[in-house]
């Protein structure tokens, strides 16, 4: 807030001279009509179309940074850093599937479509994830050889669009993820603009090349949890009850959605909060629909616990996961694993300052570049332009991603050991406190230094 | 050689596993399923040139993701019959519920009765021939393939259509956004004659009207905003 009143305190001699010379008040920018807001109003007036962009919510919302671990003390003893084991493995799909997915680390790569990403980027994700002992996920647009070939464990998304959906790919997948929604846009479908609908992408989607393409937001052949249960039965019958079936929902009503996903027969629930990235959607959707990742976890865990399904139906949380602390916090709140999208792209080279000149040419700057739908990505990741795509070396990208995944895992282990845990899954809400009242209320852990959890009485 | 599977006795898992295990050279070409009793997911994920006859009505997703097989339902079919089929043929002697042939990538779906709403929704290359009428919002977002209707079509036919072709002999209650009537040229008469023959249906191709995409929504235009 800018205070426009003159200070009432006694002015010092030198500033006295200065304030006499001033005949005008300081120009004041409105907190409501900020420069960015006004620029957007002008842009809308110029173009007559809403702003479409990639990425997740950019506004500040309560997040994992608002939580802290307590660490060990007199009553809890820690584990020795390099000597005592702290396991990180996780098995997804233990409820019904004959072949659950066994991962070395509790961090998976989230679904990102071929079309949104280049073939080489998909290959990089596959290489990196495989080297780190985890899975990748297809996306809207079907399964590519690049990804199937390089991902040891590949989750095949079953989306409303059903682009490229076929029983052969279904059977060569390691798990199936029925996508109901995404955190960036719960209730919205995909979007891929003409520039990125290359012949290969168009062919895989059975669409004309070069059109602005909107994928469906609802599944075409089921509505509601009762239908979903039958749909899952069909998928299991087609794949011989071998593969885990995940259900992915956007962070909207996590308590009910989790309970309904369990009822519908999910092996795994994937819950994506509002900071979760997308390849493209309306900015208004990204910033104003859905709830923060932090607010999603406890209601989902509560639903699982009430149904006696916590740890039996695994919970994978995504949306703004950046480092091992975020991983550890999500697990401590009750998740079995986390999933990353944006961070994986950044590890491979997205928004790298080394391309600053190119970002400037696009009217943006490294870190802020989010026009992923336009296909002109200087880092060559969110593009179908062969020249730009050639900038990404899938081997190097894979190596970088593997390094990053390993660092995150080490960080999560470091925290878990400090809390005296021999497995990262042994982290619990009691290991946490909150820095803000909002985070305390959402994560249902006490405000630091108090025993106060807002909403818990006392 | 004809083999019979009693669904009520032998169960769904046995039924689908057995049929899915058949391969191209199988000498068990003919299968009959008795006592289907409206069960869901009957004969899904088949991938061999076999003939399967279902003696009765089926629940959801009969013939889902079919490849190569010919599946004959001697009754009516529940929602999503032949959904996402890639090849082969599914024939429903009675009526079909909603979303018949949804997202089908190929093959032929024949419905000898009527089809309910959203028939051919999001179809991607399948051919669907319906002897009776079809319900509202049929061929919604249909991308590829042909939908042939000998009777009438309900409201909002072909809404947000891409490149699928719609042939209707009777009346169309209303057309959906971006769907328009188009000329019947020789190539269309020829194609329609072939589709009718494949479905074993007797109708004069010249008596049909053709509908397709106006392609006005292919690129976002602010002046079309009311259509979205
Ligand atoms: C480029 C890109 C493409 C995406 N494509 C899909 C998709 O096809 N299907 C889907 O369910 N989610 C998609 N997502 C969302 C991710 O699966 C995931 O929910 C999200 O990225 C997690 O949040 P994070 O980016 O903050 O890690 C996409 C995200 C990005 C960044």
Image (cartoon, rainbow, N blue to C red):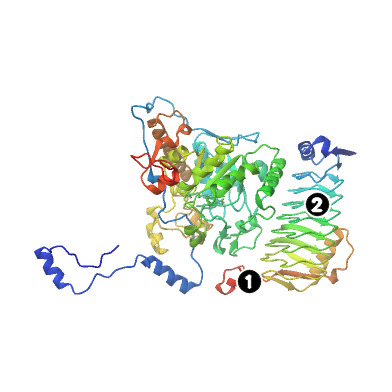
User: Across the whole image, how many numbered discs are drawn on residues?
Assistant: 2
Q: Is residue B87 left or right of residue A279?
A: right
Tell me the chain of label 1. Answer: B
Tell me the tag on residue B77. 2
Residue A269: in sight, yes or no?
A: yes
Look at the numbered disc 2 and give the secondary structure of its residue.
Answer: loop
Disc with the residue nearer the chain's start (1 vs 2): 2
Residue beneath disc 1:
B216
Residues at badges 1 and 2 in contact (C-beta under 8 Å)?
no
Give how far across and how far down residue A75 sits, in percent: 36, 27
Residue A146: in sight, yes or no?
A: no
Look at the numbered disc 1 and give the secondary structure of its residue.
Answer: loop
Give how far across and how far down residue B57 sits, in percent: 83, 48
Q: Is residue A19 left or right of residue A51?
A: left
Q: Is residue A13 above or below residue B79?
A: below
Q: Residue at x 50, y 72 (%)?
A: A48
Q: Is residue A136 left or right of residue B5?
A: left
Compute the Cα span from label 1 to label 2: 35 Å
- Does mark 2's beta carbon lie closer than 8 Å to ligand 1? no
Give how far across and how far down residue A26 sits, in percent: 24, 69
Tell me the chain of label 2. Answer: B
Q: Residue at x 87, y 46 (%)?
A: B55
Give how far across and how far down residue A222 sits, in percent: 68, 52
């Amino acid at each position: 807030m800018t205070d426009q009143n003159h200070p009432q305190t006694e002015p010092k001699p030198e500033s006295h001279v200065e304030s006499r010379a001033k005949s005008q008040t300081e120009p004041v920018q409105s907190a409501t009509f900020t420069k960015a807001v006004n620029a957007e109003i002008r842009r809308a007036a110029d173009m007559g179309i809403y702003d479409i962009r990639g990425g997740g919510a950019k506004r500040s919302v309560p997040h994992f940074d608002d939580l802290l671990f307590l660490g060990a003390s007199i009553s809890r003893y820690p584990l020795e850093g390099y000597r005592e084991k702290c396991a990180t493995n996780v098995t997804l799909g233990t409820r019904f599937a004959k072949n659950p997915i066994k991962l070395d680390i509790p961090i998976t790569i989230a679904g990102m479509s071929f079309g949104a990403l280049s073939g080489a980027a998909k290959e990089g994700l596959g290489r990196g994830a495989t080297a780190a002992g985890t899975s990748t996920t297809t996306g809207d647009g079907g399964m590519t050889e690049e990804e199937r070939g390089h991902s040891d464990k590949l989750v095949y998304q079953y989306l409303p669009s059903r682009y490229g959906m076929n029983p052969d790919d279904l059977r060569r997948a390691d798990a199936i993820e029925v996508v109901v929604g995404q955190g960036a846009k719960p209730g919205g479908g995909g979007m891929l603009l003409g520039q990125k609908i290359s012949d290969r992408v168009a062919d895989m989607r059975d669409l004309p090349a070069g059109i602005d393409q909107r994928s469906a937001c609802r599944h075409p052949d089921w509505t509601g949890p009762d239908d979903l249960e039958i749909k899952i039965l069909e998928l299991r019958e087609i794949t011989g009850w071998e593969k885990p079936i995940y259900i992915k929902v956007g962070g909207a009503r996590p308590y009910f959605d989790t309970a309904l996903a369990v009822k519908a027969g999910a092996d795994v629930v994937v819950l994506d909060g509002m900071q979760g990235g997308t390849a493209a959607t309306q900015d208004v959707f990204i910033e104003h629909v859905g709830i923060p990742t932090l607010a999603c976890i406890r209601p989902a865990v509560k639903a699982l616990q009430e149904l006696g399904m916590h740890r039996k139906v695994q919970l994978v949380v995504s949306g703004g996961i950046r480092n091992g602390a975020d991983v550890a916090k999500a697990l401590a709140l009750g998740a079995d694993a986390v999933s990353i999208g944006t961070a994986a792209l950044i590890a491979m080279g997205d928004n790298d300052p080394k391309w600053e000149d190119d970002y400037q040419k696009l009217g943006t700057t490294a870190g802020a570049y989010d026009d992923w739908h336009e296909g002109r990505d200087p880092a060559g990741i969110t593009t179908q332009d062969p020249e730009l795509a050639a900038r990404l070396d899938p081997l190097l990208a894979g190596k970088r991603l593997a390094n990053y995944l390993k660092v995150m895992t080490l960080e999560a282990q470091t925290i878990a050991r400090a809390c005296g845990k021999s497995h990262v899954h042994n982290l619990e809400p009691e290991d946490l406190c909150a820095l803000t009242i909002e985070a305390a209320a959402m994560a249902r852990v006490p405000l630091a230094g108090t025993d106060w959890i807002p909403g818990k009485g006392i | 050689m004809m083999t019979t599977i009693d669904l009520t006795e032998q169960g769904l898992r046995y039924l689908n596993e057995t049929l899915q295990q058949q391969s191209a050279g199988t000498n068990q070409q003919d299968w009959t399923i008795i006592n289907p009793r409206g069960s869901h997911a009957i004969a899904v994920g088949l991938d061999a040139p076999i003939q399967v006859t279902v003696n009765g009505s089926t629940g959801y997703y009969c013939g889902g993701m079919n490849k190569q097989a010919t599946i004959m339902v001697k009754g009516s079919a529940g929602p999503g019959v032949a959904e996402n089929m890639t090849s082969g043929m599914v024939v429903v002697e009675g009526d079909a519920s909603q979303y018949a042939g949804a997202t089908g990538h190929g093959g032929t779906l024949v419905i000898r009765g009527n089809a309910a709403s959203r028939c051919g929704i999001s179809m991607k290359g399948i051919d669907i021939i319906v002897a009776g009428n079809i319900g509202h919002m049929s061929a919604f977002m249909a991308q590829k393939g042909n939908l042939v209707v000998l009777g009438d079509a309900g409201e909002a036919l072909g809404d947000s259509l891409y490149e699928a072709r719609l042939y209707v002999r009777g009346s169309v209650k209303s057309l959906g956004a971006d769907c328009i009537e188009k000329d019947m040229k020789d190539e269309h008469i020829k194609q329609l004659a072939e589709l009718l023959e494949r479905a074993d249906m007797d109708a004069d191709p010249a008596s049909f009207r053709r509908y397709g995409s106006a392609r006005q929504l292919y690129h976002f235009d602010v002046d079309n905003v009311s259509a979205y």
